[in-house]
Image (spheres, helix red, strand yellow):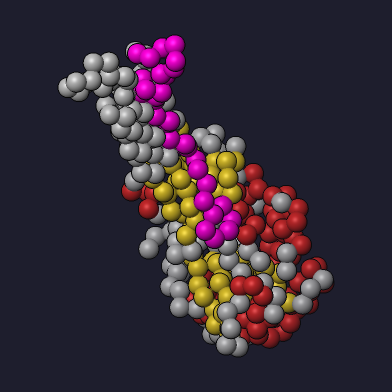
Amino acid sequence: MKFLDEAKIFIKSGDGGNGCLSFRREKFIEYGGPDGGNGGKGGSIIVETSDNLNTLIDYRYQQHFRSAKGQNGSGRNRTGPDSPDIVLKVPVGTQIFEEDKETLIIDLDKPDMRYCLLKGGDGGFGNNHYKTATNQTPRRADAGWPGAEKWVWLRLKLIADVGLIGLPNAGKSTFLSAVSRAHPKIADYPFTTLHPQLGVVYAHEKEFVLADLPGLIENAHLGHGLGHRFLGHIERCGAMLHLIDATQEDIAGAYKTIRRELELYLENLVNKPKILALNKIDALDQETIDSKKKELEEISGKKVFVISSVAKKGVHDVVSALMHIVRPSREID
């Protein structure tokens, strides 16, 4: 299934049904009173989170959602039936914005959350509603209240235990395929991954969800490259695995670029639990590996793992370390 993390949709709630203008007319009843029923309520537009979804792909093929109008009232005080609501199922972690893409309506970050985006119009009153002691033959019946309509943006921020971060072509997709059954696209050029990929990693009889995210570039916090869409997914991850290509010359610059973008986008992102690893060591000799590892440890002040995703060297150690820092609530015994 193709991953889609952003979609624009049109929604319209149903109009209320009209009230009925009617009088009782039966044999031997000379002065039948008003008996016009009220109109039914129009359908609302409701959004609900579902644990079974992890993409917004359904909203690529259908972008318009219109609820039906409530039924009109009728004689003999019969109220028109309400129209059913339309319920939009979205993955946990979906945010809904106004058409300007800046005004947040609701952040659906928990399972089984339910929110009414647009309320259906109320039905109009029939003339029986206006009967009083002084006005026993009212000739007033109201039209139903109109529904509302607008365009909204759906934006998904993945909720994963661990997010893979790094510059383009750092080997993130290869790592994901090495530790899970996911099959992301892998190629020897930058920006091979254009959409997040999810994989379930099993270790020590437990599991956690790992997200391979598109590569980050300088000034991503300003929206360059995949920009905010990439960084938004990182927000929801419980921990990060920062992969650095050991074959590039400036590994210090690679580390600083990612750290700077995280700080500029959201300050507390750099405080998330993080593991640092030099990838692609199968292409280097031991002396170069030791030198680059030492350099990176001095700059970051953290322990640095050395791994080869292709040869699966050091991968088990990294997975074990990640298992110790992922959120306990997400672990499955």
Q: Can you tell which quarter of the image residue 39 is in?
A: top left
Above or below, 283 relative to 23: below
The answer to whether any part of residue 283 appears in the image is: no
The answer to whether any part of residue 222 appears in the image is: yes
Q: Can you tell which quarter of the image residue 67 is in?
A: top left
At 69% from the left edge and 80% from the top edge, which residue is drawn?
Answer: 324
Q: Nearer the viewer, residue 26 or 323?
A: 26
Q: Magenta stretch containing residue 253, yes or no?
A: no
Quadrant the C terminus occupies: bottom right
Identify the magenta region. Answer: 108-137
Image location (x, y in percent) of residue 251: 70, 67
At 59% from the left edge and 49% from the top edge, which residue is drawn?
Answer: 107
Looking at the image, the residue that sits furthest to the front is: 28
Image location (x, y in percent) of residue 241: 65, 70
- Give the prevailing secondary structure in the magenta stretch: loop
At 58% from the left edge and 58% from the top edge, which residue is drawn?
Answer: 110
Above or below, 255 relative to 174: above
Judged left or right of residue 4, residue 269 is right
Image location (x, y in percent) of residue 106: 58, 45
Looking at the image, the residue that sits furthest to the bottom is: 204
Judged left or right of residue 176, residue 248 is right
Total labels drawn:
0
Q: Magenta stretch containing residue 133, yes or no?
A: yes
Image location (x, y in percent) of residue 264: 73, 49
Q: Nearer the viewer, residue 219 or 53?
A: 53
Q: Can you tell which quarter of the image residue 316 is in?
A: bottom right
At 48% from the left edge and 64% from the top edge, which residue is drawn?
Answer: 51
Above or below, 212 relative to 155: below
Q: Nearer the viewer, residue 91 or 239?
A: 91
